[in-house]
Every structure is written in structure tokens, then in C-alpha cells.
Amino acid sequence: MSNLDNIVLPIIKQVDGSLHPINQVKDYLLNMLAEMGFHEVDGPEIESEEFNFDMLNIKKSHPARQMHDTFYVENKSNLLRTHTSPVQIRSMLKTKPPLAFTSSGKVYRKDDDATHLPMFHQIEGIYIDTNVTFANLKNLIHQILHNLFGKDIEIRFRPSFFPFTEPSAEVDILSENGKWLEILGCGIVNPIVLRNCNIDTEKYSGLAFGLGVERIAMLKYGVNDIRDFYKSNLDFLDQFK
Amino acid sequence: MKFIYQDLLNFLSEKPSIQVLSEKLFQLGHEHEIEGEIFDMELTPNRGDCLSLNGLARDLNIFFGKVEPFKIFKGDIDLLCLNFKNLSPEACPKINFLEIEIEGSVNTYKPYLENYFSLLGARKTNFFTDISNYISYELGQPTHCFDANTINSQLIFENRNCQESFKTLLGSDIKLTSKNCIFSVNNKIISLAGVMGGISTACSAKTKKALVECAFFTPESIIGKSVKYNLNSDAAHKFERGVDIQAQEKVLRRFIEIVRDHTSIKGIKIQSFEDIQAQQDIIPIDVKKINKILGIDLEEKEYLTYLSKLDFGIEKQITVPSYRHDVSSQNDLAEEIARIIGYNNIEGKSLEIIKKVDKSVDNVKKLKNHLIKNGFYEVINNPFTKNKEKESISIDNPLDSNKTCLRTTLKGSLLDNLLYNERRQKDSIKFFEISDVYSKDNQINQEKKLGIIISGRRGHNYLDFSKKLDNAFLNELLNQDFDNPFFVIEEISRAELKTKKRDKIYYTEISIDKIPDLFFKDVDLGLGPMNFIKYQPVSEFPSSARDFSFSIKDFKKYDAVIDHLSHLNDKILKDAFIFDFYENKKLKEIKVGVRLIFQSPSTTLSDVEIQESVNKLLKPIIDLDGISIPGL
């Protein structure tokens, strides 16, 4: 090259921004569940006690309903949803089984420390049909976790307690350092919840599960401090392209 | 709840190792950590029955057999005839009292009692209270010891509205409000029932005669009180989760036995007040239903054997033990069976969910993709603010005074995000947030909004570096049809922002519903495979920029220079880009401006360190003939 006319200008690369890492993980999980047959439903973040607690068999005496755990608004007329389960309740009231829903989005609890935030994201799934069993639930959870963490990941189910499922389980995966990490909660939908949604419990049963999106994102990306997701630091966000 | 490994072994026929015991506790759903020989349990809130050695042993009976290693007093006891009135039997359907008087004082404890305090780090207070605490550990039933000589008039229990102050036995003053379960004497509150006793009637080392109260308080009447009054109460923890309504007399007889084990008893009297007869739950035997819930094939005989080992009564129907408040349905029994079999031993069975065709078009995803392709970063902010507008929804119990309302606009959050990054030397900021925003008039309104904020350079490449993000950029980005505008751009004044920056800030907020369909016509969803990058922690140390201008006169070297500049790499080099490019045809010269940005993850870089890196990075170019770097 000996004259200016032959010069090729430096290439201008298109510099993309990025989707927030929490929404990337959320979309990834929702797409995976959509492939399995789950249909996404949406609902409000401001909820009534009826849909957030009563319909889900969370009794008046349950600690989660206390002012120190739940944000109430407008003189206790409503609350900020503490989970995305009320979205499923609203959807079950509108749709007859068989049904398979996912609900996702922001949820709120009155926490604020290094490992808990007052706002975080959940994805929940529910499947109602004839003859849905705990064995089916196990198979489904294995599929989800194998998709997320690979076929070789070791998975452990532990009995737990959620008012809206019975039996209930928490599921752990074995981390590289040999420690079990709690990854999701699940169970067989409590027939009380199905009856609250006018579903015939003699005919139908269901399974349900819920994941914390931040937890999955922290594990998959190696982010140690949950608060980093919400500082809106460009150096942080720029890494998730 | 903590327990000593050896103490639990005393309740079991077989003597499993710590490891085996731990595995079985996990299988049963009793999460824990182990330090030495101490198990620190994190029991689920529905298993209040397991908050004791006896309770855990009942659950472990299926694996290791259970024994009762403790003695209880079996002799006759005189009736107490206590002047007591229960005004709220719905909150306390059953309550027993033991009056016990001892001779002399107790200076040393038997090993089982001494170990409880020394190994678990529990604090000794006085003989009667120490036994009370130990019995709660052993049998799960809280008791409260009054100094009997301080109860000199009618003792009243009631669940009533209170406005009095009350001094706890730990010395803290509490102002009681709203409804509380209380004991009172002569209209004076002496105990916050089920939570903590008062100092005025507390036992001391001098107490010789104690009145031991042993009750069943309903969880609903106790819940939330210890948190409300900031009292750390083991009793409240247990009552909130439910104790055994049939255990009180046995517990008081155990109390007598422990006292007898340490000193001579001068007198004992006991009395029971039972206002509501407890009913035990009955569930039909239906192993088919259990198999249907779990997806297993269990024989009825095996099913009933399992349940009987968990103390369920098996006759024509299944009777739930009085302490199992968590069991009332077939699904609850299915969980019992699953725990015994082991969740991990139930084989998974595949299911096929019939997919429903979803033809909906996700415009939000399209919008996000469009913005990202134009260099925007998505942010997520929490909705709390202190800025109260007329239409704001207020939080009844905010975390702090800066979070008393829900935001009615995304602007404040996005402006905070922008300023945060400007303080971190960012000179080109393009953020967006999409979020539901809530407001009120006669009802609560929900609106999905897009907020966009921009400031600084359009970009870092040589075409955009000197251009600023502005009105025109936003109009072009969103393809604004000026005959039918769907958004308004606002320039945010820097006057009140206390920032030295001069770049103008532009903001727009759009209701997603108001974006015309036409906008989405040519925008793709942009769904690609997910790439889980390995995140590198963001440096908290300042970055430093160095600009260089290369003058290229020997055009044969041009490609080599550009190629080298495109592949600069050093551990402290954070970013490098060509921000200026100029062909001077008259002087037959090309000028290339390069900015190098340095930052260390662990320290503030010195000029020397940066210069060393610069020399290393640029040496291959400097060494070329026909290239000069004025100023270097």
C-alpha cells in the first residue's frame, strides 16, 4: 500500500449494550420451561392478602404475614407480593386443567442485608393434570437442573415445608467444593390450594416449583454479592454481553 | 435449636455414628450443621414437635428405635387448689400448675444437667429456672417458674388489649400494646405468657418454693410477640410452632423427678385446668391414595408399619399423634411415607406436558433487543422512593425513611444510575429500564413503562467520539414520527445535581402500550444462545486514561499499526480504542488517535506502572520506521 486512496479505514465494530444479567437468566429459564410445555402468565406486583396468602393456604398466624416480613401498602389494604404464586392462582381461576404455567418477576420481602434484598426475582412453575405424582416432579426437577448445571450434577431432595405444597421438598446441588447448595423449592400442590381454585381434587393433582433467579445467576456467573446486580455499574453490566 | 449428640443417643436404642445420624436427619427433613458433637438444627416451622431430644427421637424411631432414658415421678401428688382464673381459654385451652418446695439449696448439678449448660453454652440462672430450661430441651414443653411467695392473690390469665409497661425477668422494660396473653396478680402484669416472665415474680437463688406453670398456648395467640418486643424467647419459638397438648402433666412429673435428683422435696401439689377438650385428627386408611400422590407402589401392611413407628394410631382409621399439628390429610401422610422411604429413593417418572401453541409476539423483548443493539444497557432498580406524589402508593412498614413510597416514574432511579457511573469516570452512558409502575386514584393503577436516559459521547469509535448523545439520537433511535409523536424528550438540568460534568442529560419515559405497532415491524427478537460468562469482580480503584496520536507516513506500515492497535493486551489495560482517524492528503499523512485505559483490580496504579505498560504495549509500533508518536 503506497497511497492514501488504498487505505482501508479501521473497522467500526458494533458495540452492543447488554440485557441485565438477571433478566438474561430469567429469560433463559423461561425459554427452557417453555420448551417443556410451560406457558408464561403475568400478574400484578401489588396483591391482596387473599391471593398472596389465603388462597395459598398460608394461615393468618404464619410468620410470613407479619409486618416484619411483608411490605403492606395503603393502610394494609394490599401488599407487595412476596412470591409469584398469586399469579398462578389468578391463572388457575381462569383456566381449566390440564394446565402448565410459569410466572416470573419481581417479588418483595422485608429483608436488606448482604445475602437478602427487599426486591428479588422468582420463577415459579405449576402443572395440573390427572395423575401428577411426586415421581413426576422429581423427573422434571432433574431435567431442569441437568439443563442448567449439566448432566453430571449431583442432586439431593430434602423434605421441607411450604403451606401450598404437600409433600414439599427443597432441592440441593453438590458444588465443586463439596458443599450442598440449596437451589429450589418444590412439591405436590396442596389439594387445599386446588380446591380454592375450584379444581376437582378427586380428578386432578399438580406439581409446583420455584427458583430464585438471583441465586441461579450468582452460581452461574460466579457473582458473590447479590447487591452487585443492582448497583447499575457499567463495568459490571458490560461483562454480561 | 442445638443438641448434644450423646444426649440424643440416650434416647435411641441403636447408637448411630454422627455421620449416619446426620444423614438420617437430613432424610427426614431436619436440616442442620455439626460442630464437634453439637448439632445445630434448622427445623422447618411446621415441626415444632421436633424441638427437643424426645421429639427428634420420636422421628428417628423408624431407623434406630426409641427409648425413654429419663425417669418421671410416679407417686401421688396432692391437689394444689390454686386461686386461678383463665379468662381466655381459646388462647390457653389447657394449663397445669405445680407447686414445689425444697429443703436447703442446690450447689452442684448432676452431669446430664451440668452438661446441658456447659456444652451448649446455656446460661445458668437459678435452680428452678435451670430445670425449666433443661426440660424444654429434653421434652420440648416450655414451663415458667414463679417464686410462689410472690403470688399472693388471684392469678389471672387473659388475652387482652394492654397498654401497660412490663419489666421482664431479664430486666428489659417493655411497653405492651394491642392484644397480649398475660398473667396478672392484683391487676398487675407479672408475665407475658408464652414468651417471658416478669422480674417481680421471678425465681432467684434464694427461692425455695416455686409455682411452675405448664400450659398449651395456641400458636395464634403467641405468634409475633417475641419479634414485636425484641425478646429472644425459646418458649415463644416453641409455642408459635405448637406444643403437645397432652404433655403437661408428664412434664411436671419429670420436673419433680429432676428436683428429687438434686435435693429433698418438702412438698408438692399439682392442679390441671382444662377448658377445651383436645381432639385428635382422624384420617382414613387409603394406601392407594398415598401411592397415587407419590407415584410409588407400597403395600398397605408396610405403609401402616411405617406410620405406627411414627406413633400414629392404627385401627380402622389413622389417629394422628397429639403433637403432630402438621398432619391432617392424605397428602400429609404421603409426606411422612416419602420421608421414611427417602425422597432420594423415590424413582423419577417422566411426564409429557402437551405444549400449547403460543402465537403472541413479545414486543418488550423486541424493544429490549433494539436498544441493546444500539449500545444501551438494561438496569433494574427497586421501586422504593421517599418522593411522595399525590398518586404515590405508600408503604405502611418501609425499611427506612428513604423508601416510604413506590415510585411513579423511573426517572429518579435512572438519574441515580447515570450519576453513579459518571462518578466512576464513564463518559458515554446509555441506560434503559422497563418496569411496571404503580399509582393510585380511586384504584391502584399498573402501567408498564420504558425509561431511557443518555448523556456523554455517542460512542468511543472515531466516528462517534466527538459527537454527543442528544435529542436527535433519541428521535432516530425510536423512529419518532413527528406527525404522531409518542414520546417527549426532557433535558434534565444539571443545576441541582451538584456535578461538574457539562454533558447534557436527556430522558424520556414511554408507556409501552403507546409505542406504535409500526415501530416493532422490523425489529427482531434477537434470541441467541445463552452465554454464561465468568464474572470478574469490578475494580474499586480509579482508572487512568492515556491518549496517543500516531503519525503514519509510510503507508506500507498502516495495516501493521492498525492490526497491532486492535490486539493490545496487558493485565492492567482495561480498554483501548481508536477515537480519532484523519487522512491528511496534503501532507500525505495518516493520524490515528488511540486511548488506552488502565485499571488494576487491586491497587491504584502509579504513573510509573502505567508508563511501563504503555512502553510495552506500544514498543512494536515505535520500532517501526515511518511511524512517530508526537509527545511520547
Image: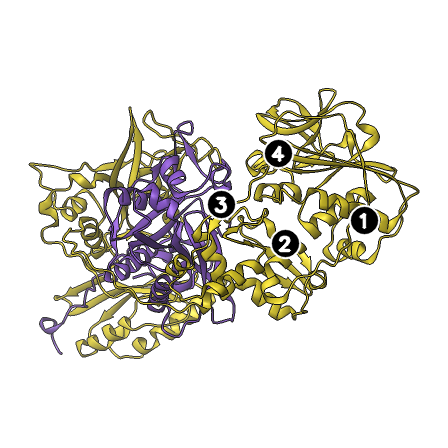
Q: Regarding mark 1 in the picture, which secondary structure is present there?
A: helix
Eyeballing the image, is B408 above or below B178?
below
Q: Determine the colour of chain B.
A: yellow
Q: Identify which amino acid the numbered label 1 is placed on.
A: Glu
The numbered mark at residue A73 is: none
Q: To which quarter of the image does residue B268 belong?
A: top right
CA gap, disc 3 and disc 2: 34 Å
x, y percent for residue A162: 45, 50
Q: Residues within 10 Å of mark 4 (few under 14, many from 20)?
A: some
Q: Which residue is mark 4?
A: B93
| Closer to the eye: label 4 or 3 | 4
Q: Determine the colour of chain A.
A: purple
Q: Which residue is mark 2?
A: B55
Q: Regarding mark 2 in the picture, which secondary structure is present there?
A: helix
- Tell me the subunit letter for badge 2: B
Q: Quadrant of the C terminus of chain B?
A: bottom left
User: Which residue is the extreme one toward the front?
Assistant: B316
